[in-house]
Each structure stands twice: as structure tokens, then as C-alpha cells.
Image (cartoon, helix red, strand yellow):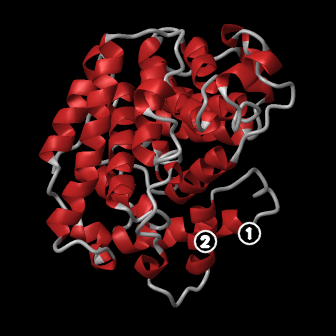
Amino acid sequence: MTTTPTTPTKGAATGSLLGLALGDALGFPTEFNDVPQILAKFGPWRQLELPRQAYITDDTQMTLALARALRDADGQLLGGPEEFARRVRQEYVAWNVSPDNNRAPGATCIRACELLADEARDWRDASQVHSKGCGANMRVAPLGLLPGLADDVRAGASQLQSALTHGHPTALAASDLTSYAVRLLADGVDPVGLVGRLRSYALENRTTYREEWLGDLWTRSQDPSAEHFTARGWDECLAVLERLAAAVADANPELDPCLATGQGWIAEEALATGLLCFLLFPDEPVTALRRAACTAGDSDSIACLAGAFAGAHLGADVWPADWVDRVEHRDELLALGERWDG
């Protein structure tokens, strides 16, 4: 078992969590609009401003739910797969019944959480195995930020937290890749080589079914074997990473990133388009968020992922102080970031 080294000095966890929430709040008003509509309502995309009341959506709410399940797990094995599943399940169910869960939550998350509320039900029987919506990975960043976590534990836990609601193999693979990308950036990997490393990781794990974490989840699908189930998900992620690599090589920041890598309603496209917005402006995090929020697709999810990547890369001090001061859940985000940054 290998453990990825951590470099807490730049405040990667704080930067990533804040970036995620800020992207979410910036993209909240633009979601469900196409680019011409966004430009007509808000003006040039490079001048998009955070709303005075910077409300977040279910993206940040569910990220915080996962983070709360991890608060006492620093550097540990998360208590093992079943204990981890129990903790996360409890937090997801609590989110679902919260009166604050009124920010256009995804239907898959709602349906799965309703089933998970029955404590006698095996969580695998609640999983929506035919859904690969971006709810699977919009919330997974905390597993890339938790210090001292072994790589195989991070991977298994990332897939399990997805599977509690979104059990499609592409949702599992995209969640694994998303937390891995956050971890790499937090550890100082050069963004220039990031896509290549993600492709290599996907190829290495293409037929690895994490039975310790997922149990017999794959049998709920129509796949003939666990390996076939797993490969189906990784192959879809590899395909979108190819599109991402081509888009980065021929970058035009004035074009809607969704044209290159998809609108982000599904997990692999949310990963790729969030990464594209970040990689277009790796040293200009606010510009990356603005580009992500001005997209024709799932703008808040794309922007929250772009923010998670940018903050992990650049650290805690890159976000405008006046934005941080008014983002919803600021205090909890800062407390979690400080805890994990050490």
C-alpha cells in the first residue's frame, strides 16, 4: 500500500474547499442558461461577479456532508469500508431531509437518499446503478484533500461515496479520477502534465474492481463480470480525457468549454470540463471560475470542480477576500481546511 506525500504549507485543502464553494456560488445564477443568455443577463464573462448573497447549491452541501463524515478520519483507513459507508450514508440522508436542501438537488441523489434512509436496506440496493450524473463527483474533493490517506483507500472510498447514490461504473471511475486530480494538484504536480497522468491512471485501473469497498454492487448491472463492469466506466472516462487533451492542445478560452468536453450533467463530462476551465487559466483562478460559470451546461458543478482544482493547485490565499467573506458556509469551510492543512 502506497501513501501519497502531502505538502500542507500552501493551504491546499483550504484553497480547494473555498474554490469549490465560490465556483458553486458563482455558477448558481447562470445554471440552466446558455452562453448568450448569460452574457445578456450578466455582461462579459471575464467580469462576472459573485452575488452579494453568495448562496451555494447542493454541490457544496453534499461536499460538506462528505467532509463531515471524514472529520475524525485523518490519516486513518476511514474505519474500514462498511464504517465509512455508514458514516457517509448518515450524512447524505441528513442532507436529504434538511430544510436547506432546496437548491435544485439532483433527482438521483434524492431517490437514493430516500432509499438509504431505510437502515435495514443494504446500501447497494439503494444505489442507482444506471445513473452517472455529476452528483457522483461534484462532492468528492474532500477525499483528495484528506492528509495521509493511502492511494488505494482514497480510490476505494471515492468510488464508494459515489456508489451510495450513483452506481454506474462511469460515475465510480470519474469520482476516483476527480479525487486523484485534486490530490495530485495539492501535492504540487505541474498542471501541464496532469491530463497525461490521469490517462495513465485510468489505463492502470481499467479492470480493477474494488470489491473490498463495493462488494457485489456490479451484480445489480447487466454486465457479465466485475471486470467488464469496471472497464465500461474507465473506457468512457478515457474517451473524455482524449477530448480534454485535444481541447487543451488547441485552447481557445473565448469558446464555451462545453463545446469541447460536454455540458457536465454527467460525471465524466463534469470532470473534463471542470478541468478544462482550470487548465485554460492555471494561474488565474478567478478567471477560471468565471469561464466555468459562463457555460451552456451545468455551470455550478463545472465551476465548483474548476475551483476545487484551482484551489488545490494554488492554495488558500488566491481567492478574493471579499468573496470569501460572503460565501455561504464560510466558517465551516475554513475550519475544515485548517484541520486538513495542519
Around disc 2, counting alpha carbons within 10 Å, would you say few (fewer than 14), some (14 to 19), or many (20 or more)?
some
Percent of width and height locating residue 138: 52, 45
Against 341, is 75 above or below?
Answer: below
Residue 295 placement: quadrant? top right
Residue closer to the observer: 242 or 112: 242
Residue type at mark 2 is: Arg
Apparent side of residue 111 relative to residue 134 in the rendered image (left or right): right
The reply to whether residue 17 is in sight is: no
- Please report contact status of discs 2 and 1: CB closer than 8 Å, yes or no: no
Query: What residue is shown with label 2?
Result: 111
Around disc 1, counting alpha carbons within 10 Å, would you say few (fewer than 14), some (14 to 19), or many (20 or more)?
few
Residue type at mark 1 is: Val
> Residue, x 61% and y 30% (percent of image)?
296
Apparent side of residue 139 relative to residue 24 in the rendered image (left or right): left
Describe the element under mark 2 as helix, strand or loop: helix
Q: State the mark number for residue 260.
A: none
> Residue, x 26% and y 30% (percent of image)?
242
Residue lying furthest right in this view?
Answer: 52
> Residue, x 56% and y 86% (percent of image)?
119
Residue 90 placement: quadrant? bottom right
Residue closer to the observer: 173 or 299: 299
Precedes in sequence: disc 2 or disc 1: 1
Against 330, is 140 above or below?
Answer: below
Q: CA distance from mark 2 to mark 1?
A: 12 Å
Describe the element under mark 1 as helix, strand or loop: helix
Query: What residue is shown with label 1?
Result: 97
> Residue, x 53% and y 52% (percent of image)?
135
